[in-house]
Image (tube, coloured by chain):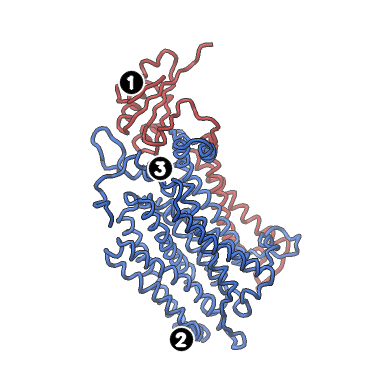
Chain colours: A red, B blue
Amino acid sequence: MPPTTETVLGVFAHVDTTVKALEELRAKGYHDLEVYTPAPVHEIEDVMERGRPVSRVRLFTLIGGLTGTASGFILTIWSAMQWGLVTGGKPVASIPPFVVIAFELTILFGGLSTVLGMVLLARLPRLRPSPAYDPRFSNDRFGVAVRCAPGRGSSVSAILQASGAEEVRA
Amino acid sequence: MSAQGPVEAASPTFADVNRDVLRTLAPPGNLYFAWMSIVGLILAAGFLAWSYQIYVGMGAAGKRTPQMWAMYITTFVFWIGIGHAGTLISAILYLFRARWRTSIYRAAEAMTIFAVMTAGLFPLIHAGRMWFAYFLLPYQNQRYLWPNFRSPLVWDVFAISTYLTISTVFFIVGLVPDIAALRDASTGWRRRIYGMLSLGWEGSHSQWRHYRRAYGLLAALATPLVLSVHSVVSWDFAMALVPGWHSTLFAPFFVDGAIFSGFAMVLVLILPMRHFFGLHAYIQEKHLDAMGKLILVTGLVLTYFYICEIFTAWYSGDHFERASLFWKVTKSYAWALWLMYFCNCVSPLILFWRRARTSPVILYVVSILVLIGMWFERFNIIVPSLGHDFYPYTWGIYKPSPTDSMIVIGSFAFFFLLFLGFIKVMPSLSIVEVKETIPQPMKEGAHAAHH
């Protein structure tokens, strides 16, 4: 069976050439792009995030945080009711001090579910490297991997070369 | 300073950052092993003292009424406080986009975790009968215990375990892309281990976009958390009726003191690191200057709190508050109080002078004094207050015993051993965040001011 897509990788040494390549590719209608950067770069993020909704990690944080608040109150109120010991003439389920526990659990659950969200959404852990990955991308090179229809590889290569890629491989 | 000259002269490139950070992980020399052995020996002595205390009982720690809290809780509060500067640097300054934080935040964050781990030992050491440690967990009452959620001590269990968990998670998330860089630069079994720890991180945009969002959210969660932790610790005292403790001032007072001592500890760790690893291009004079300013500001705020504390004790008209204060200032523990005032209020004043803020030697001396002062601050809150409360028949003087002193000294060894180990297995300088701060590689119009 012939491959349904092919992947072309351009390796760049500079941010501005990488951005140029991305802009060019998007203008030509190539949208299945992946960029590898040693560190987050605003210019590249701006191009890649254009017209996309923000990451859904925050939804995990919200749900985790609210779960934490609820469990904090449930734990404290339920435990206090189980024993029912009146001290200091205060109600058994005395809310103000329980807020401290609820707050701590909000942060705890919120933080843990944020990380869980990141791991799930970023598809981690990745057991074997993706084919386009190159160890230089964690050092000082930027990579642009373009997935395109078979036969379009040469025109993608041409765009990458023209933008200033120092290496292009299909 | 050294041969680095004007700091802006040659900014490191991306490849320089990788090279310089990898260099810090090179096999250590004899000096490192000498330090490790000294620290290890002290730690062993500490463990010996602890074993002795477990075997003989809490009397070995010199604990008798009214000084049941004495050294252990002093040191516990001290270590929790040390952790706070790390979270301040890694989370609060991140939210404020203070770019100078990038080169020190990793070491500061590691310091936080190790300090909280060290602190976490003290409730166990202090409570005695180690084998009942699980009684701290407030699960339901099969043990016929009453989990009293109104007690600040229970809040403390929640606050500190949350703090340790979230700091560790935040630290690990920050490490993942850096470990990927280590993985790509290493071979053999190291590569396998780093490969596993990096979770197969590739730095692709589809990873970064979630990563960045998650990192920001974690910073936003850690910020109120760090303020809450030392407030909760302060309520261990403030919720009690003991004169000298029962004050609404305590939460901000503790948080400020924590940050003050934490910054001093950051400098104590960073300055030798900078020297021995030759990180002058990353930890520049402007970083030292900024740290010095933060120590100065928190020190001045602390001085203000001390004045408030004295003023409220006098102005309250409360007989016991006044008596407690008078006793602290003039009697048995007055030396500790005045030592604390000198270390925390007077010694940081030299940092008004710019040359002192950029001189590693002066910063180091001030930091050590601040650490001594802040340890004694907790001592002065706990020991003299407990030693002189409402009834003369409960008054008492506490003298440290060899056992509890050795355990406290051992805790410092525990902390430094963890830190020394860390700097040789993990990047103590954040590869990714430093790259974000230095000029990005541009083909044209190099060094376009990035934001």
- Residue type marked 1: Ile
- Determine whether, in the image, residue B69 is placed left or right of residue B1: right
Residue B315 occupies quadrant: bottom left
The answer as to whether the residues below labels 2 and 3 share one chain is yes
- Residue at the (33%, 20%) spot, across then down: A159
**Residue under the image location 69 percent in, 62 percent down:** B135
Amino acid type assigned to the residue bearing label 2 in the image: Thr
Give the structural element (helix, strand or loop) at label 2: helix
Residue density around tag 1, few if under 14, some if 14–19, many if 20 or more, within 10 Å: some
Residue at the outermost top position: A1
Q: Residues within 10 Å of mark 3 (few under 14, many from 20)?
A: many
| Label 3: element kind | helix
Q: Earlier in the sequence, mark 2 or mark 3?
A: 2
Image quarter hosting the N terminus of chain B: bottom left
- Asked whether the viewer can see residue B224, the reply is no
Residue of label 1: A159
> Residue B68: which quarter of the image?
bottom right
Same chain, marks 2 and 1?
no
- Chain letter, disc 2 residue: B
Provide the secondary structure element on which disc 1 rests: helix
Are the two marked residues, 2 and 3, in contact with CB atoms closer than 8 angstroms?
no
Q: Is residue B120 above or below residue B193?
A: below
Q: Nearer the viewer, mark 2 or mark 1?
A: 2
Q: To which chain does the residue with label 1 belong?
A: A
Residue A62 versus residue B96: which sits nearer the camera?
B96
Disc 2 target residue:
B330
User: Label 2 to label 1, Cα distance in Å?
Assistant: 81 Å
Which residue is label 3 attached to? B432
Chain letter for the residue marked with disc 3 in the picture: B
Query: What is the x, y in percent for residue B352?
Result: 29, 67
> Residue A100 at x, y = what percent?
57, 61
